[in-house]
Image (cartoon, helix red, strand yellow):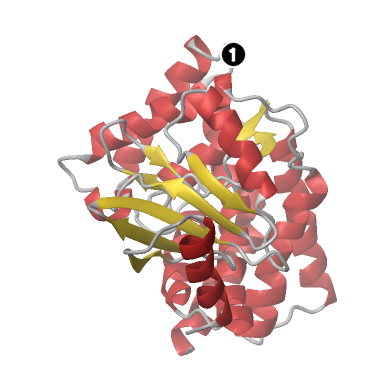
Amino acid sequence: MTDRLSMLHEWLRVDLGLTNYDLQPASEDASFRRYYRVITAGKTQIVMDAPPDKEDCQPFLDVTKRLLAADVNVPCVFAQDLQQGFLLLSDLGTRLYLGELNENRADRLYGDAITTLVKMQTRSSVENLPLYTEALLIQEMGLFNDYLLDKHLQQPLTEQPLAQLRALFVYLAESATSQPQVFVHRDFHSRNLILNQNNPGVIDYQDAVVGPVSYDLVSLLKDCYIKWPQSKVEQWLLQYHRQLVNVMGVQVSREEFRRWFDLMGVQRHLKASGIFARLYHRDGKTDYLKDIPRTLSYILDLKDEYPELQYLMALLQDTVLPGLARR
């Protein structure tokens, strides 16, 4: 038994008074956090284990309050020990969207998710939330170069191509920051949405920021873990656009919003592919490597629509995808 697990058992037994319970792993996380399901007398709750030297529970607690006040279905916090990094939460269930989505259910589930997204964006307080700045957006895209190209594929760019790539990062960041700025979950996708009675339950929102209005929609509809035909994505995109105009009052044409959405997707998928490579090299997590080709495929889908992305398209087709195939 690890030291963290021993500490967790002691907290449950001594501080919370639980004597007869079963503790099971609840989910895998891309951070240093771990989640366990506590089962006692037929009742289940979730324990978050966030080592305080690596994770800070305060943002989770802060954003939880904001989302509960906005009537978003997120876990309630029953107990906390911030010094040790433990939280006891309500259990939203085990039915992640990723395992529940199919052709028959997708329209309903994505419809519910879009309704919740609009609720988050219109009702959640953003006071004192961190800003998704141009510098942060560029820094995130740098993970693509640092971890996927340099470290994983061992294909570092020479000076001129690197300058082209960095210029593209600036272009994408400028597009993002030019959009209306709203509450952004940052990982609003099929592994963080849970099918339940008050659908969907929403988790993993502690990194919320004030940022581009299209960001969470990209996370949802251009999901790194599941991909839908373009015709379905267009249908859901139009559904959101109607609410953007009629509910949120953002007067933007479908064409302009589509451009925001597509370019935001390029930023997110460069970032995500770099994160997946970092999870492998830094944290020894191999499962995310298989998601990189799907993640980058969203960028390649745009190759005939955005001439300003042609350098990136060539880089992906000539260097990155062949390198991934060799790995």
Percent position (x, y) of residue 241? 46, 23
Percent position (x, y) of residue 61? 62, 42
In the displayed structure, 264 sits above or below 167; it is above
Identity of the residue drawn at 56% across and 66% down? 273
The kind of residue tagged 1 is: Gln
**Tally of numbered tags:** 1
Residue 255 appears anywhere in the view:
no
Percent position (x, y) of residue 127? 74, 27
Identity of the residue drawn at 29% across and 57% down? 40
Q: Is 131 placed left or right of 148 in the picture?
A: right
In the displayed structure, 244 sits above or below 113; it is above
Between residue 59 and residue 150, name the one nearer to us.
59
Between residue 86 and residue 326, name the one nearer to us.
86
Identity of the residue drawn at 44% across and 66% down? 28
In the displayed structure, 72 sits above or below 283; it is above
Q: Is 203 placed left or right of 44 in the picture?
A: right
Between residue 314 and residue 5, name the one nearer to us.
5
Q: Is 40 placed left or right of 186 in the picture?
A: left
Residue 205 appears anywhere in the view:
yes
SS at circle 1: loop
What crowding class fits label 1: few (fewer than 14 Cα within 10 Å), some (14-19), or many (20 or more)? few
Q: Residue furthest left?
A: 104
Percent position (x, y) of residue 10? 52, 69
Q: Quadrant of residue 272?
A: bottom right
Residue tagged 1: 251
Identity of the residue drawn at 52% across and 50% down? 204
Q: Is 154 placed left or right of 116 in the picture?
A: right
Between residue 69 and residue 128, name the one nearer to us.
69
